[in-house]
Amino acid sequence: MLYRQYGDARVIEKHYPALRQWEKYMEKFLDNGLMTKNTYGDWCVPPESPELIHSKDPARVTDPTLISTAYFYRMLQILSQDARIAGRPTDSSEYDALAARVKTAFIQRFFKPGSDQFDNGTQTSSVLPLAFGMVPDDRRAAVTERLVKKIEVESQDHVGVGLIGAQWLMRTLTENGQGDLALKIATQTSYPGWGYMISKGATTVWELWNGDTADPAMNSGNHVMQIGDLNVWFYEYLAGIRSDAQAVGFKKIVIRPYPLKGLDSVTASHQSPYGRISSKWIRKGSGVQLDVVIPANTSATIYVPGRNVKESGGARPDRVEGETTAFAVGSGTYSFTAE
């Protein structure tokens, strides 16, 4: 995260030897490609009763080995990138090979093609494979569809994941064409959800979704990790501000907002190492107006929702991708109108 946000590789170069030692230590716990070491699982999934801390319903509990294996795979992906940055290409290839074996073992053990679910089909058991790229390519849409049905039918468009699933829920839904559903989850004021906490007077994030009714003996009132990926979703998806993966640290910027149904406008800014980046969109009839500021000494790709797009200063589109028009621009102030 530090490298992506600031473009400074020293933090990776300094800590890479320790990261590698940790991976080698954890590798000892692999059993036929599966990571079996886990204690807490998907902590604090909303239970079936408002008095419970932990669900007693097996259908709500995600297999701890599924969670640990998915995260070990994710860790190997990150370490492969870190190794290349640290000038250790042989290590990177080693991580890639091990990751491929872990992914194969994961799919063989947990994926059920007949029902397009992983293991017992909890929401987190679908969210993690979708987020980490562990779903067979030809089943990705079907797994997403099943996740959507779980959320709509079983959760009534509310949160149905614990701490682990919450870290990827909003982004995963949005990246798979379900941003409107993510917005419904984010704006619920009834139990369970962030809005419910606010409706009960919370000024910080509870550890438990039912923090007002469960046993207070195990119930932190300031559990920031329970916010999940909500803040990332606000800035990188609703406003669309992010650093290009090929030129980290905001040397090259990506602006790709999601104007979801139910939102009339979004305004956000980020103070990057090169200066302030801002993104503001507002609905205009059936289209949107998008105003963007790109700081000096940077460039950007701006994705405007719509196919018929004009820019007030005469910037010309670079390409059209589906229902989105992309502009490759330098620093400056831009105003786009899409119909």
Image (cartoon, rainbow, N blue to C red):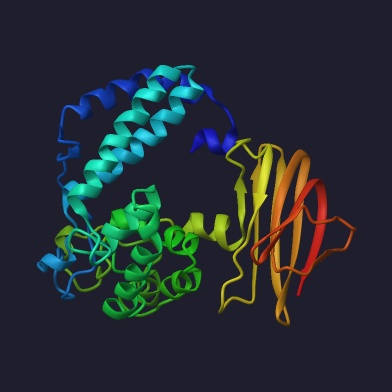
Q: Residue at x 41, y 24 (%)?
A: 92
Task: Please state the horizontal and vertical placement of residue 305, each as a whole percent of the image.
Answer: 67, 66
Q: Is residue 270 left or right of residue 65?
A: right
Which image quadrant: the C terminus? bottom right
Q: Is residue 227 visible?
A: no
Any part of residue 325 in sight: yes
Whether residue 118 is situated above or below residue 98 in the rendered picture: below
In the image: residue 174, left or right of residue 263: left
Looking at this view, name the residue that lies furthest to the bottom.
285
- Image vertical order of residue 35 relative to residue 141, above or below: above
Q: Nearer the viewer, residue 2 or 304?
A: 304
- Give coordinates of residue 201: x percent, y percent: 37, 73
Q: Quadrant of residue 48?
A: bottom left
199 lies left or right of 221: right
- Viewer-closest of 326 and 44: 326
Q: Quadrant of residue 252?
A: top right
Residue nearer the viewer, 17 or 217:
17
> How many labels sit on residues?
0
Vertical arrangement, residue 74 with respect to residue 7, above or below: below
Determine which quarter of the picture holds residue 320: bottom right
Residue 78: image location, x then y, percent: 41, 34
Q: Residue at x 39, y 77 (%)?
A: 199
